[in-house]
Image: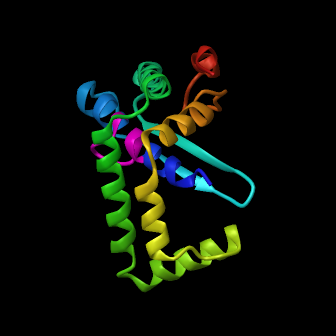
């Protein structure tokens, strides 16, 4: 039931070039070329994943900045402007995705297999529009204010990340 609020949260956190992660990690600090977030949703579980592609020497700093961005979302929520931009993106990308038959069928198949029913386009757009700042803040508090799992790929010493997880 919170997937729409989670989608808005994800968009603000790391869903594109206007996201907090992209702006802070890449644009402001130059710590990474690639940074963002995404969601995976299943019938009984899901994940919000943050990723960063950075040099090993900058990884600790990048991870600390990511933690600060997440802490800010949990503490303060998102702004009305961020919410409107995120909703506009989610609505627009959903409608544009209907132009491609493969995307259309993927949407239908995913809905049927994960939830057992298909939400109409109009209902989907209504649910995005209905998300409030309070909804996003509640999801951020529940999803982002818990323990984290860290996975790193590349040549590195495991002890380098011990204090970050």
The answer to whether 48 is drawn above or below residue 160 in the figure is below
Residue 101 position, x and y percent, is 43, 85
Query: Residue at point 32% right, 57% down?
Result: 89
Q: Where, quadrant-wise, is the N terminus in this rendering?
A: bottom right
Relative to 143, residue 84 above or below: below
- Rendering quarter of residue 142: top right
* Quarter placement of the C terminus: top right
Residue 154 visible:
no
Residue 122 visible within the image: yes
The residue furthest top is 163
Q: Position of residue 68 (x, y in %)?
A: 44, 21
Which residue is nearer to you in this view: 114 or 81? Answer: 81
Which residue does the image show at 39% across and 68% down from the upper left?
Answer: 94
Which segment did they paint magenta?
11-20
Residue 92 belongs to magenta span: no
Identify which residue, 74 or 162, lies in the foreground: 74
At 63% from the left and 29% from the top, the residue drawn is 148
Vertical placement of residue 46 versus 152, above or below: below
């Amino acid at each position: 039931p919170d997937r729409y609020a989670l989608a808005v949260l994800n968009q603000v956190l790391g869903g594109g070039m206007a996201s907090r992660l992209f702006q802070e990690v890449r644009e402001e600090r130059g710590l990474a070329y690639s940074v963002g977030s995404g969601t995976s949703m299943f019938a009984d579980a899901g994940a919000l994943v943050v990723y960063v592609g950075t040099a090993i020497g900058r990884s600790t700093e990048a991870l600390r900045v990511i933690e600060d961005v997440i802490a800010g979302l949990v503490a303060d929520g998102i702004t009305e402007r961020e919410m409107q931009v995120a909703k506009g993106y989610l609505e627009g990308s959903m409608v544009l995705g209907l132009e491609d038959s493969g995307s259309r069928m993927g949407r239908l198949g995913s809905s049927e297999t994960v939830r057992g029913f298909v939400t109409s386009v109009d209902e989907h757009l209504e649910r995005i529009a209905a998300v409030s700042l309070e909804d996003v803040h509640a999801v951020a508090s529940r999803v982002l204010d818990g323990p984290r799992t860290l996975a790193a790929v590349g040549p590195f010493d495991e002890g380098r990340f011990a204090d970050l997880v």
